[in-house]
Image (tube, rainbow, N blue to C red):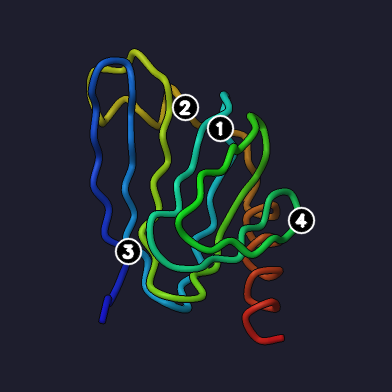
Amino acid sequence: MMHGVGVQHYLEGGLYAKEACIPKGYVLVQHKHKFGHLSVLAQGEVLLDIDGEQVKHTAPCCLHIEAGKHHGILALTDVVWYCIHATDVAEVLDVDDTLIELHVTDTTRQDTLERLKAAANG
């Protein structure tokens, strides 16, 4: 049984991958990215919320997340999720500054969180 989100970072040849191991029932509210990217659901089942539209996905699947779209997930089972970005960043500490839009408001994050929690309870 998982007790929190475990995260690993990988940089190689112009690619950045973030691996997240997410326990069942956990709501992971994301952010907006400056560039589109791929997300790979390697294990489990999630409810993905992208700008208010919710879709259930079951592994294995590869998803395209468009630039500028606020997204979050509800883990319906224990999940292994990867975000994959093309980038020339050489250090993990520089990834967020390069890839994430910083002007996402707390209200936007809270709205996504509330939608996903409601879906979990409904």
Please tell me the numbered disc located at residue 52: 4
Describe the element under mark 3 as helix, strand or loop.
loop
Mark 1 or mark 3, earlier in chain? 3
Height in image: 78 above or below 53? Answer: below
In the image, 118 versus 45, the foreground residue is 45
Quick one: label 4, few (<14), some, or many (20+) residues within 10 Å? some
Mark 4: amino acid: Gly
Q: Which residue is mark 2?
A: 99
Question: Residues at badges 2 and 1 in contact (C-beta under 8 Å)?
Answer: yes
Q: How far apart, in angstroms, are the residues tagged by discs 2 and 1?
A: 6 Å
Please tell me the numbered disc located at residue 33: 1
Mark 2 or mark 1, earlier in chain? 1
Q: Is residue 103 left or right of residue 76?
A: right
Mark 1 or mark 4, earlier in chain? 1
Mark 3: amino acid: Val
Quick one: label 1, few (<14), some, or many (20+) residues within 10 Å? many
Quick one: label 2, few (<14), some, or many (20+) residues within 10 Å? some
Please tell me the numbered disc located at residue 58: none
Describe the element under mark 2 as helix, strand or loop.
helix
Counting from the top left corner in percent of width and height, residue 85 is at 43, 28
Question: Residues at badges 2 and 4 in contact (C-beta under 8 Å)?
Answer: no
Question: Residues at badges 2 and 3 in contact (C-beta under 8 Å)?
Answer: no
Q: How far apart, in angstroms, are the residues tagged by discs 1 and 4?
A: 16 Å
